[in-house]
Image: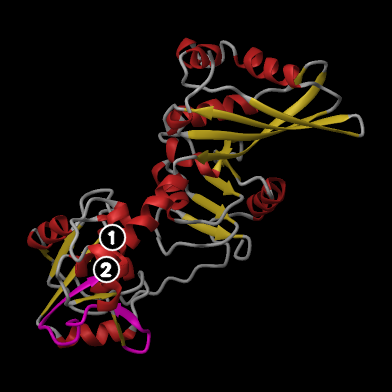
């Protein structure tokens, strides 16, 4: 009872306990079960989940020093991502262990299947190079394997050394995509007149190449970022058609059949001409001095936690959660500001967009995505 077979474990919750006195392993486990009881409803009751095998045996390793106990806690879970994140958040609410006050902080949620996936990818590459010349696209693992074979077809164009297909310069029709991975996706589908633009800051080499072509086609992701690239391209050259990946998908994720379907379904683009307006914004436009001071204080407090905090427009905290669990959270209301102890990548950017935030602050910028509705700051630009 209470054990999960090793093959069925999907995730392991890793947490750290800091107690203000000496406590034993049974005190910690008892606190986890006792203080979470009734908190999440019968369906998410830890005892019931353990009886049914969806939560495994809780492993606790304690360390006593200077009259205080520290402990590493591991909770195996066969639940889905969302429910596992909820269990992790519930464990963080525990405030007392045995006779002492204490605090439990989430370190990470480990996907234990990653090691097996890595082995499959590496072994598949070995098999492909030795025995297989042609393979059918069957998902992300097959794309990773096939990419190593197709890389040889990629050429560099111009001084920016943009990733391109071998016919990007010679063909009358040019297909413009966001990045190198998108170029590889089109090469796998047999499309060679393709070139990457490397984000929304379009290189001059692209503008010059577009002028030489009879037909220019933008092939972009099915999200807001794709719309921004289309807009940027239309401001440096003449676009004839736009092809988009299905909603929520990226071009690099498409198999060959989907790539060709999207290109066949391209739609004419109506060029509206370039805008001559230049917008100049101050370094911290959108935040008052009081708000900037508040954000700097919160960033300092979050340092090292890999968490984010959500606030309304009166700077009242609406919640805190680990950055690793943000994909499972949607539909927050009254969100004005998000402060994260993490780089602003694509996932964090769209988490802020999807939950209606006006301002996003992180440690540094790792995405080229932009939105008029969201102001983005880093520690350096704040």
Residue 240 appears at what percent x and percent y? 12, 72
State the quadrant of the C terminus. Answer: bottom right
Quick one: which residue is furthest to the front in this view?
A: 131
Provide the secondary structure element on which disc 1 rests.
helix
164 with respect to 324 (left or right):
left
Within 10 Å of disc 1 (Cα), the crowding (few <14, some 14-19, many 20+) is many
Q: First in sequence: mark 2 or mark 1?
A: 2
137 with respect to 353 (left or right):
left
Q: Quadrant of residue 109?
A: top right
Q: Which mark is residue 244?
A: none
| Residue linked to disc 1 | 252
**Residue located 63% across and 60% down the image:** 379
| Residue linked to disc 2 | 184
**Residue located 61% across and 24% down the image:** 58
Provide the secondary structure element on which disc 2 rests.
helix
* Residue 276 appears in the rendering: yes
Q: Which residues are magenta?
A: 158-179
Relative to 224, say whether 106 is above or below. above
* Residue 146 appears in the rendering: no
- Within the magenta stretch, is there residue 176? yes
130 with respect to 329 (left or right):
left
**Residue located 51% across and 51% down the image:** 359
Depth check, front residue: 249 or 12: 12
């Amino acid at each position: 009872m209470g054990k999960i077979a090793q093959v069925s474990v999907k995730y392991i919750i890793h947490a750290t306990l800091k107690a203000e006195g000496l406590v034993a392993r049974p005190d910690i486990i008892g606190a986890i079960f006792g203080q979470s009881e009734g908190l999440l409803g019968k369906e998410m009751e830890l005892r019931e989940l353990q009886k049914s095998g969806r939560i495994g045996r809780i492993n606790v390793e304690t360390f006593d020093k200077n009259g205080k106990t520290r402990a590493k806690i591991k909770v195996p879970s066969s639940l889905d991502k969302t429910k596992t994140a909820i269990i992790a958040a519930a464990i963080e609410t525990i405030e007392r262990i045995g006779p002492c006050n204490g605090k439990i902080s989430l370190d990470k949620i480990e996907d234990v299947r990653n090691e097996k996936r890595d082995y499959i990818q590496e072994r598949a590459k070995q098999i492909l190079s030795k025995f297989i010349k042609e393979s059918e696209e069957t998902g992300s693992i097959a794309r990773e394997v096939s990419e190593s074979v197709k890389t040889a077809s990629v050429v560099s164009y111009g001084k920016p050394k943009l990733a391109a297909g071998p016919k990007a310069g010679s063909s009358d029709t040019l297909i413009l995509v966001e990045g190198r991975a998108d170029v590889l996706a089109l090469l796998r589908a047999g499309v060679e007149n393709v070139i990457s633009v490397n984000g929304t800051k379009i290189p001059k080499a692209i503008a010059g190449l577009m002028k030489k072509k009879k037909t220019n086609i933008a092939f972009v992701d099915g999200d807001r970022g794709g719309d921004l690239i289309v807009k940027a391209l239309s401001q440096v050259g003449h676009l004839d058609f736009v092809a988009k990946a299905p909603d929520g998908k990226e071009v690099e994720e498409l198999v060959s059949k989907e790539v060709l379907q999207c290109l066949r379904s391209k739609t004419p683009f109506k060029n509206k001409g370039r805008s001559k307006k230049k917008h100049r914004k101050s370094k911290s436009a959108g935040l008052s001095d009081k708000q900037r001071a508040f954000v700097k204080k919160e960033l300092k407090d979050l340092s090292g936690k890999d968490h984010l905090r959500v606030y309304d427009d009166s700077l009242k905290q609406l919640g805190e959660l680990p950055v690793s669990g943000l994909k499972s959270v949607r539909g927050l209301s009254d969100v004005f500001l998000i402060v994260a102890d993490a780089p602003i990548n694509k996932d964090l950017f769209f988490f802020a967009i999807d939950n209606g935030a006006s301002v996003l602050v992180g440690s540094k910028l790792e995405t080229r995505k932009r939105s008029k509705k969201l102001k983005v700051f880093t520690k350096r630009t704040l």
